[in-house]
């Protein structure tokens, strides 16, 4: 307990109280605070049974968490009316949180802790001096002193604020029998170590670990190892931080046959459809933690969809694909890298590259987005023995061809096909043919697009024009 043996001690107490309530806002108030804190920490004396605080200990947490820095009186006693200082001696000012005379005294609190520290009055009544620290940052790493002047006792809490991420592995082929693997992991704190393990979890002899510390104090580690291409050579890259008791690892299968992706292929669809652009790892392996890029090299930016370290990375995605692409995490686990493209447009026509950097390997998918419509036939220049027919069909993509067929399905000799391409990139084709008026002359106009394996046709009975030619109104 704090014993005031001189009446003069009451004056600083009241002044500090008023300063805490912002009654005094002058240099005098600040001066009073400094002198009062010094008096508190140097003049408090012990009475009765000696009290101690809990031994020093370590607290481990992650960035963004709310944590408790523990400190307790032993034996337990009410500390509400006592003095307490939480501080870091490596800071200036050192004060993390000060308690005096039943209230917080935060006039000279270190700015980096403003609004993030608190003590519980109810717990102080039970001798619990623990400090709550909210929204932990990397800069909070350090040694915190819980100082209880009444017993001239202190306890130190070592706070370790950790940060970690999963590693990625990239493979560089050396020859048919060996491959060089590079593992990298960024965003760690404290500095981690990187290990390579073989199929039996034994340590592999690897190159030295390169360590970089960024301006944010986070570490990036990387290392290379050369391994043989054997049937069951499963390699693990593990990054671990022993103080945090945390580790992250990534596995890769190295076989005698290099991992490849499916051969190039062509996909044909129609405007408005949802389609799958296929791409698979052979042999299959889990690709969730790997990198994958779907792109079109004729676009700027080229990125259609990017997957990195277990999540979509669409910051630089080409705007024309926004909200229309997706990958399946479950399928990626099985080595299926296929991309779903929704609400296909004509502008989606092109060559898509499925690029898997871990090998590196790539596959190309040619996407052809088709559009088609049925042709119409009209008769012009009708006379008593012949009729000129015109066939036209609009709204095609890619450019189609137009054919005239007789009753037996044989090609007719017709005029050249006229082709127009509109501002929407859709094609209109038309052609004319002259035929004799015979009773059973059934003709067909067919418009077809071989690339998309689609055709549309219209049939006409030439005899229908006989009555038209015989009509008084016929030309």
Image (spheres, rainbow, N blue to C red):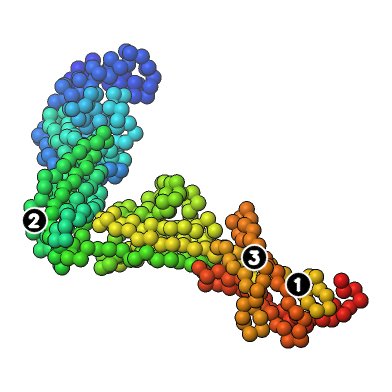
Q: Which x, y percent locates residue 209?
A: 14, 44
Q: Residue at x 65, y 62 (%)?
A: 418
Q: Earlier in the sequence, mark 3 or mark 2?
A: 2
Relative to residue 54, is residue 320 drawn left or right? Answer: right
Whether residue 246 is visible to the viewer of this picture, yes or no, is no
Q: Which x, y percent locates residue 292?
A: 33, 55
Circle 3 sits on which residue? 417
Whether residue 260 is visible to the viewer of this picture, yes or no, is yes
Q: Nearer the viewer, residue 241 or 450?
A: 450
Circle 2 sits on which residue? 203
Q: Residue at x 46, y 62 (%)?
A: 367
Q: Nearer the viewer, residue 388 or 171?
A: 388
- Cα–Cα gap, marks 1 and 3: 15 Å
Q: Nearer the viewer, residue 254 or 158?
A: 254
Q: Residue at x 73, y 73 (%)?
A: 434
Picture quarter with the N terminus: top left
Badge 2 marks a residue whose secondary structure is loop
Q: Nearer the viewer, residue 29 or 470?
A: 470
Mark 3 closeness class: few <14, some 14–19, many ≥20 residues within 10 Å: some
Q: Earlier in the sequence, mark 1 or mark 3?
A: 1
Circle 1 sits on which residue? 388
- Cα–Cα gap, marks 2 and 1: 85 Å
Relative to residue 76, is residue 470 drawn left or right? Answer: right
Q: Earlier in the sequence, mark 2 or mark 1?
A: 2
Question: Do the numbered discs 1 and 3 sit on residues whose CB atoms are within 8 Å?
Answer: no
In the image, residue 100 above or below residue 299:
above
In the image, residue 216 above or below residue 416:
above
Badge 3 marks a residue whose secondary structure is loop
In the image, residue 344 above or below residue 414:
above
């Amino acid at each position: 307990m704090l014993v005031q043996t001189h009446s003069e001690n009451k004056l600083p107490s009241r002044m500090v109280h008023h300063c805490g309530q912002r009654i005094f806002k002058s240099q005098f108030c600040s001066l009073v605070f400094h002198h009062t804190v010094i008096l508190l920490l140097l003049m408090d004396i012990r009475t009765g049974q000696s009290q101690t605080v809990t031994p020093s200990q370590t607290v481990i947490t992650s960035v963004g968490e709310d944590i408790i820095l523990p400190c307790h009186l032993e034996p337990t006693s009410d500390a509400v009316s006592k003095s307490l200082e939480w501080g870091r001696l490596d800071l200036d000012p050192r004060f993390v949180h000060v308690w005096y005379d039943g209230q917080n005294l935060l006039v000279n609190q270190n700015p980096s802790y403003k609004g993030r520290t608190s003590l519980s009055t109810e717990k102080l009544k039970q001798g619990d001096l623990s400090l709550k620290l909210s929204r932990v940052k990397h800069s909070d790493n350090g040694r915190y002193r819980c100082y209880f002047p009444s017993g001239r006792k202190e306890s130190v809490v070592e706070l370790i604020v950790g940060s970690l991420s999963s590693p990625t592995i990239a493979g560089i082929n050396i020859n048919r029998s060996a491959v060089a693997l590079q593992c990298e992991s960024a965003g760690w704190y404290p500095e981690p170590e990187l290990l390579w393990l073989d199929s039996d979890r034994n340590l592999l002899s690897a190159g030295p670990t390169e360590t970089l510390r960024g301006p944010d104090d986070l570490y990036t580690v990387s290392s290379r190892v050369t391994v043989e291409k054997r049937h069951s050579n499963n390699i693990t890259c593990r990054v671990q931080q022993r103080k945090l008791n945390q580790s992250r690892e990534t596995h890769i299968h190295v076989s005698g046959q290099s991992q490849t992706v499916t051969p190039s292929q062509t996909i044909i669809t129609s405007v408005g459809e949802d389609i799958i652009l296929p791409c698979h790892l052979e042999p299959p392996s889990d690709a969730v933690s790997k990198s994958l890029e779907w792109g079109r090299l004729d676009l700027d930016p080229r990125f259609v969809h990017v997957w990195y370290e277990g999540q979509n990375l669409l910051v630089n995605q080409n705007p024309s694909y926004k909200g229309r692409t997706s990958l399946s995490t479950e399928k990626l686990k099985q080595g299926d890298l296929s991309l779903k493209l929704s609400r296909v447009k004509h502008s989606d026509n092109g060559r898509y590259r499925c690029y898997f950097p871990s090998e590196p390997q790539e596959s190309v998918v040619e996407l052809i987005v088709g559009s088609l419509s049925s042709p119409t036939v009209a008769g012009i220049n009708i006379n008593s023995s012949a009729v000129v027919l015109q066939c036209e069909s609009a709204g095609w993509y890619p450019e189609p061809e137009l054919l005239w067929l007789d009753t037996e399905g044989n090609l007719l000799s017709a005029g050249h096909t006229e082709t127009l391409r509109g501002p929407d990139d859709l094609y209109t084709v038309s052609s004319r043919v002259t035929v004799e008026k015979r009773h059973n002359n059934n003709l067909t106009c067919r418009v077809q697009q071989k690339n998309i394996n689609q055709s549309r046709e219209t049939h006409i009975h030439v005899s229908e024009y006989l009555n038209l030619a015989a009509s008084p109104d016929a030309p």
